[in-house]
Structure formats: C-alpha cells, structure tokens
Amino acid sequence: MNADRSTSKPTPVIAIHGGAGTITRAAMDADKEAQYIAALEQALRAGQRLLADGASAVDAVTEAVRLLEDCPLFNAGKGAVLTNAGTYELDAAVMDGATRDAGAVACVKRLRNPVLAARAVMERSEHVLFAADGAEAFAQAQGLPLVEADYYYTPERHAQWQRARAGSGMALLDHDAAALAARADADEAGGEPLDPGTKFGTVGAVALDAQGRLAAATSTGGITNKQLGRVGDTPVIGAGCYADELVAVSTTGTGEMFIRAVAAYDISARMRYAGSSLEAATHAVVMQSLPAIQGRGGLVAIDAAGNVALPFNTEGMYRGHARVGEPVHVAIYR
C-alpha cells in the first residue's frame, strides 16, 4: 500500500491490528463481524482525526490502542485473557520513533489502560520497562486509574479459558482458543457453526504524523491459560513494538517466537542495512523468518514515506489503516 509521494511530506496515516490467528468466516456470524469492524473503524477514525488536527504519532497510536483496550472484543484491558490460575496479567509498550524513547509495563493486574502506563514510563521516568507491583505503583503515582480484577472479566473470555483447560491444558493463542470454542459449539449444535463470542486479540497501532514522525504501541492480556509470570513479546522493545526514523512496527502472534526473532527490529534492520523496502522486509520476517521457528502471527508497519504493510501468516488478522483525508479500510480474513 504505497503512499502518494508527489508532495514533500507524506500524508499522515495510522494502521492498527487486533490480533492474528485462526479466524474463519464459519465461526463468525454477521452481527459479531459487524461489531469487530465497528470497533476497528472507531479506533482508526480516532487516530485519523488526531493526525488531521496535527497531533503527534505518539498521540495517535496511544489513543487508538486505548480505545481497543476499552473494547471487550479484544484481548487488551477489558476482556483480557486469564492465566492458568484464573487471574489477569497484562502488558503494553509505546515507542517514539523520532527520539527512540520507549516505555513498557509487564504483568500488571490493576491498570485500566496499560498503554497509558507504558507512555507514562516513556515520558516521566528514566527507565524503559516496569513490571508487576512496581509498574502499578509508578502508574498510580502518575494519577492513572486502577481497577479491580473483575473489570477485565467477560463471560466469553471465562468460557474460553475453561475450554482451554478442559482441552489440551496448554496455553493458546487468542484466536486459536476461539477456534476451539467454535468447534465445541459447532459439535453441540450438530455441526452448525455458531459464533463463540471469543475472538479476541493483542492490539497495536503504528502511525506517521504530519511532521514525518513515526510511533508504535502494542497492548495485550497475553495468551489464554498462560503460566503465571509469563511475558510475551508485547512489552519487549524490538520484538512486539518498535519505532525509529525509518519504520514503526506493532506485532501479534506467538510471542516467544517474535522475541527470538527480534521481529519488529528486524524489519528496521533489513531496511537500514540491506536497503529492503517495507514490503520486502515485512514479508521476509512474517513469511520466512518466523515460520522457520514455528512463529505464527502478523504485524502492522508504516515507513517514513507513508507506505503501509499488514502481513500475517495465519488464517486471519483483525487489521485496518486510514490516511488523513481518505476513507478508513478494515479487514479480518485473508
């Protein structure tokens, strides 16, 4: 998706994702699909409006991710997945490509919007990553709201966790856990596919603003039935979130593999050192490097010229992008 390069400055643009995995039309009824599309469009339009008003890329990605955290359809904030102990542990990160300043929080249990805490770490501390109680204490000191654990609860997410435990007992990617629920519902209904109400995902956003600055943000509740204390790629700068003067990247998928591949930074490295285009760099990482180590998922990325890439190697990925002055584009399936 190439930008218009006829002017000296690229048109501001934002791209978002809501997770990747086993997403099939058979397990999604029209009403639920419409809800996902509406939620993605709302987040994109909010970021688009900010960029149109001259706001920074950091402002745009933070607001888009905050809205997705507040939406129970996705696995970030409200509607986060449960650990193997039936608790919640959330992660988030923000990075400003213009300065390479970054902030992240991991294993937080009481923050309504982990992305706001991650931004506070970036802007109001000398550190990059805070975890658990320390992250919550820092966020509280910055005036960010705390919530009780039941804030994150949704009946669908709880049912998804119970099915994961009754099945293999292993941790499952959000959309794979949703597919497990869909198969169970289909079996109960005599093979008729029913919407399980459990397709959720790690969320993220990348943006390019009118000043040519790039930024990225990512937020997640992790993976269903994960072991207590497990941290995936989301708060790891260079793995789940990265931005510099060349590119901004937010990822989603099997976090351990994205960490091992240093997936988000690898895109920048391929562009910087090998001269790869955004399209070539993202394709190499998502379709070659990650599958080579059984890595599943996808990402959204924007380069300094305003080009957008949204590749994924799974059945689907909730995704979309919006340029200032143009219509919003969203998609779910391949």
Image (spheres, grey):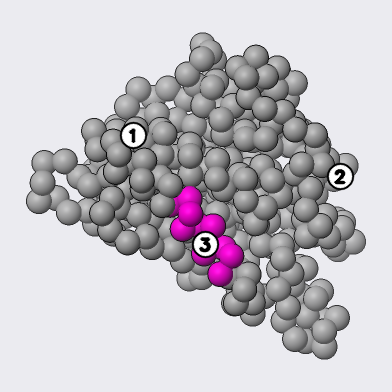
Q: Please tell me whether residue 152 belongs to the stretch shown in magenta.
A: no
Question: Is disc 2 surrounded by few (<14), some (14 to 19) or many (20+) residues within 10 Å?
Answer: some
Magenta segment range? 34-44
Q: Which residue is mark 3?
A: 38
Type of residue at label 2? Gly
Residue 106: which quarter of the image? top right
Q: In this image, 7 relative to 112: left or right?
A: left
Percent coordinates x, y for residue 44 in the rendering: 43, 52
Question: In the image, what residue occupies the spot 60% across and 77% down?
Answer: 30
Q: Is residue 32 above or below residue 137?
A: below
Q: Residues within 10 Å of mark 3 (few under 14, many from 20)?
A: few
In the image, 122 versus 334, the foreground residue is 122
Q: Which residue is mark 2?
A: 86
N-terminal-most mark, 2 or 3: 3
Which comes before the other along the chain, label 1 or label 3? Answer: 3
| Image point (85%, 81%), residue name | 188
- Is residue 113 shown left or right of residue 184? left
**Circles 1 and 3: CB distance less than 8 Å?**
no
Residue 180 picture location, percent across and down: 76, 68
Helix, strand, or loop for circle 1?
A: loop
Q: How far apart are labels 2 and 3 at the CA level?
A: 30 Å
Q: Disc 3 residue type?
A: Ala
Q: Residue at x 28, y 58 (%)?
A: 326
Q: Element at badge 2?
A: loop
In percent of the image, x 60 and y 61: which residue is there?
A: 21
What is the three-letter code of the residue carrying label 1?
Ala
Residue indicated by mark 1: 55
Q: Is residue 41 magenta?
A: yes
Do labels 1 and 2 touch, CB within 8 Å? no
Q: Is residue 223 visible?
A: no
Q: Please tell me in which quadrant of the rendered image residue 69 appears.
A: top right
